[in-house]
Amino acid sequence: MGREHLTIMKLCRFLTADDQAVVGLSLDDATVLDLSTAGVERLESVLEHDNPVRLLRELTEDTLRAHLIQKVRLLAPVDQQEVWAAGVTYLRSKKARMEESDFSATAYDKVYEAERPELFFKSMPAKVVGPGEAIGIRKDSKWNVPEPELALVINSRGKVVGYTIGNDMSSRDIEGENLLYLPQAKIYNRSCALGPWITVGVSEQNARSWKIQLQIKRDGRAAFEGETSVGQIKRSFEDLAGFLFRSQSFPNGAVLLTGTGIVPPDGFTLRAQDSVRINISGIGSLENSVTVV
Ligand code: DO4
Ligand code: MG
């Protein structure tokens, strides 16, 4: 059968049995195809193509080595892309931040309405945590939360070519004490998780109908659950990517987290051994345990 019916595809990186990190393509829930057997060595080879879906369709016309997903270890789907994040893109995030700090409330209020979005550097690609790995909470912080976010996968030309799941781990007490501490609240070991799939072939309009769900489990029981929708993001993806690429080039492309719309109640903080599961309809689920760093 031809592959014309395939218009949405899921890319990943995974570790083969002989410990090689390769690019994978999943066409069903059970198997992943090793794209290195078709000469694709890096995600960028697909993401930089004019038409990634057409390229992937053509690649699957050859016989590719297939692995059972359950038998491989999925890795964070980044090679050399810097990871950035947008903030205060949901009303929920603006309100939570204004409550967290009188000192910074005006800044959050203003940036929500401003033409220029809040954008901040989040992670070098090599420091990103993948599916099933531990995410970190800082040992010098008493108030730590996950931020479940849709992540835009952007090529070097500034075009949004795919989507993955991001966790913008944050220390709210450090952030709330002084806005200038934001980099310490946001960037530390294991503070960014991505994965498991990069979904390609979906328009912004369709992605805006996706649901985002967060489930935090403690000792096997639900400790917090929340839900929002991508459609509630105030800014367009093109606008966010456009600001990131203003006066700045990304020869390997970039990943941009789009902000959180789910904020656990103020009395809630993550603990070591908690498990954090983020589901985005249209992508899948990213699950990580928590460790102190
Ligand atoms: O300025 C604070 C960070 C905001 C953020 O990360 C978010 O809204 O997701
Ligand atoms: Mg965030």
Image (tube, rainbow, N blue to C red):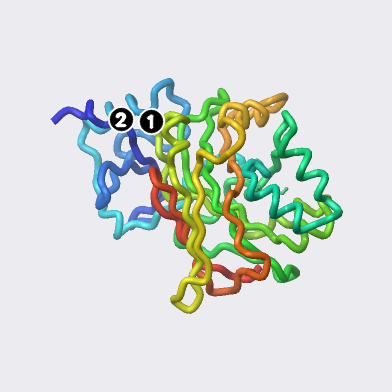
Give the side of residue 256 with respect to residue 96, left or right.
Answer: left
Q: Circle 1 — which element?
A: loop
Residue visible at 52% across and 44% down in the picture: 150
Q: Which image quarter: residue 136? A: bottom right
For badge 2, the amino acid type reads: Thr
| The one of 125 and 228 positioned closer to us in this rendering | 228
Q: Disc 2 vs disc 1: Cβ atoms closer than 8 Å?
A: yes
Tell me residue 189's x, y (percent).
65, 60
* Residue farthest right in this picture: 103
Tell me residue 268's x, y (percent).
63, 69
Residue visible at 51% across and 30% down in the picture: 160
Tell me residue 219's x, y (percent).
48, 79
Location of mark 2 (residue): 7
Structural crowding at the residue carrying mark 2, measured as other residues with C-alpha within 10 Å and reported as few (<14), some (14–19) or many (≥20): few
Residue visible at 45% across and 52% down in the picture: 75
Location of mark 1 (residue): 201
Residue 15, relative to residue 36: is it above or below? below
